[in-house]
Image: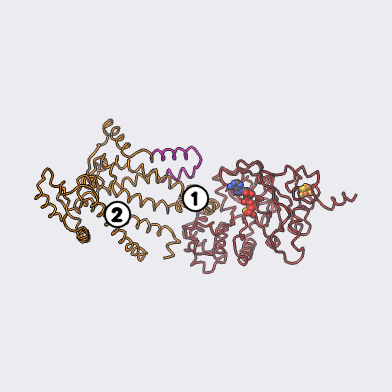
Amino acid sequence: MLSYIARRLVIAIPTLILVSIFVFVLQKLLPGDPALVLAGEERDPAVLEFIREKYRLNDPILYQYFSWMKAMLQGDLGISLRTNLPVTELIADKLPVTIQLAVMAMIIAFAIGIPAGILSAVRKGTAIDYIANFVALSGLSIPNFWLGIMLIMLVSVHLGWLPASGYESPFVDPLKSLQTMIMPAFVLGTALAATLMRHTRSAMLGVLKADYVRTARAKGLLENVVILKHAFRNALLPIVTLSALLFGELLAGAVLTEQIFTIPGFGKLIVDAVFTRDYAVVQGVVMCTAAGFILMNLIADVLYFLLNPRMRSSL
Amino acid sequence: MPTEAPDNAPQNAPVLEVQDLSLRFKGAPANIVDGLSFAVRPGETLCIVGESGCGKSVTALSLMGLLPRGVARVMSGTAIFGGQDLLALPQRALADLRGDRISMIFQEPMTSLNPSYRIGDQIAEIVLRHRPVTRTQARARAQEMLERVKIPAASNRLDDYPHELSGGMRQRVMIAMALANDPVLLIADEPTTALDVTIQAQIIDLIEDLQKESGTALIMITHDLGVVAEIADRVCVMYAGRAVEEGPVAAIFDDPQHPYTIGLMSSVPSVGPRSGRLATIGGMVPAIDNMPDGCRFAPRCPFAGPRCDIAPPLAELGPSHRAACHYAPLESAFAEAAG
Ligand SMILES: Nc1ncnc2c1ncn2[C@@H]1O[C@H](COP(=O)(O)OP(=O)(O)OP(=O)(O)O)[C@@H](O)[C@H]1O
Ligand code: SF4
Ligand SMILES: [Mg+2]
């Protein structure tokens, strides 16, 4: 197991290097001169030159790349052009917000998607199945931003139940934190629930046909035991893998949703950075996201192993 | 107690008596099992034989209440077990019987155990479901059952996962599970078809031994006439969803009366060890959308005549020997023809 994880981590290194090259090159290809942005109204060539010198924008490209990599390995992602703060600090600031949002969204997605998927598989072809599928399809086709705006209009503006925007750390005021996050988490969670429901349904349909499910019934086990213990347990593998990937996506930041609810998370950070050509921040955030994604992939694989006795004993 | 075996019933009353069982798949124009009747007495072995697709498995599944839901349906019939009609019992009551009073083992040992759980736990589970025992007691019972099905080093095997066992071993685990609660009736649906030939005989011997030991009644569904000769007390020959002949094993082998049975037996020597699969008979089993209205064997029957447009009843020929042919017993038919 440990050697497997180690192997996977080693494989992750070239992936990360590729991502870094990609990010770096893309950045350089973007139109616009960051020095111009920084200088603002100032058009004095001397000032521009000073800025370029200061941020090493004049160095050869390869040199820029390697010095960036070197710094990154030392935990230094550079300084934000816009805020003058270290990028690591910005990320450390925003990451917990995004993680909280992702976790809450995931909980909502599980709570809705998995029971609905199981139910519609067990009741395949009945009204319940059709309704669940219809709702899921609607959930997939309703854009997040639209649902978000509708929720704000209804719940915040019209009913006045929840704040429309803002953020509070759960360590400062847990209740207020929950109140500000519940709507965006719901918007993200329901969309994922639809995906999760459809995957759960198809995985369950597969295992419900299995001979061991018939054996479970032949043992006289009650239907809920047959379905949850014998069928669902074997449908877990694809669901777990999918969940880890969905969570990785959530960590990348829900740009639109964070924007609508003005949540100071990863999504907002990267949007602001792109619009202001804040190179260091964009690069840092993308690298961080890629690492998070690779990590979630690894976790998915590890869970896959832990859940599968056949794989487990082959190690 | 509704779930108890018929203790106070007369000694020779059947454990299970199936009458006029008809099953149909959704949208099919005819019954896949049609008017099937048979009975099993305590401790008795009834072999159900017949070509592939004649409805043996669906019959067994219908008795267990395990027909695929919404796909197959019971059209008529009763199956009296312990004074109750299995076909009319509510799901919950039937689940109380399953794995306790009636057990079943299946054709597919490789896929019939849950890959995610240890075999000891899978056996203990059936005990815990039906008996007021602790986990420790259930586990002890699981080990005892593994020993009874002759799995070597049983105590070390309890924590194995199914994939760590061979097909033959897995079928032994299935048998251990099925017998863990000392059922009154065991239904074995071609338990050896998927196994190596050498293993087949071992498994059949094991089932035979365990059945003698426990006095369980056994319905053995098989293709293998060697198995029939070895373990059957009575035989029910099925053709296209109907019983065409039923009787004591000696009568079926030595004095078959239905033309289909005669065809089956033609390749089997009547003395000495019997072995081999069912003989092939010219022609094919009619498809479900092409079932003759009368005798379903007529298209392949060398004796078919005008009377065969009407389905023949299962008529008594001798002591508990019955056949469904207008010309049975054949002696009288020949006499008729000669006279
Ligand atoms: N789900 C289903 N839908 C429609 N027809 C089915 C279904 N399952 C089985 N059948 C049909 O029912 C018939 C009886 O099947 P069954 O499995 O009982 O045969 P069998 O006698 O057990 O054969 P075998 O010896 O091959 O196991 C077959 O002809 C099969 O095609
Ligand atoms: S009833 Fe007729 S067709 Fe059917 S088995 Fe007898 S002789 Fe053959
Ligand atoms: Mg079968």
- All told, the count of numbered labels is 2
- Residue B318 drawn in magenta: no
In primary-sequence order, the first of circles 1 and 2 is 1
Q: Tell me the residue at 32%/45% (across/down).
A: A105
Q: Please check whether the numbered discs 1 and 2 fall on a single chain.
A: yes
| Residue placed under numbered mark 1 in the picture | A206
Q: Residue at x 75, y 55 (%)?
A: B261
Mark 1: which secondary structure?
helix
Rendered view: B52 above or below A112? below
Q: Nearer the viewer, residue A219 or A82?
A: A82
For the residues carrying marks 1 and 2, which lies nearer the camera in this image?
Answer: 2
Say which residue label 2 marks: A290
Q: Is residue B294 above or below residue B255?
A: above
Determine whether, in the image, residue B332 is placed left or right of residue A191: right
Q: Quadrant of the C terminus of chain A?
A: bottom left
Determine contact: label 1, label 2, CB under 8 Å. Answer: no
Say which quadrant the N terminus of chain A sits in.
bottom left
Going by the numbered disc 1, the residue's amino acid type is: Gly
Looking at the image, the residue that sits furthest to the right is B339
State the image coordinates of residue B330 (x, y, percent, origin top left).
82, 52
Query: Is disc 2 placed on a helix, strand or loop?
Result: helix
Is residue B315 in view?
no
Q: Nearer the viewer, residue B182 or B313?
A: B313
Chain with orange colouring: A
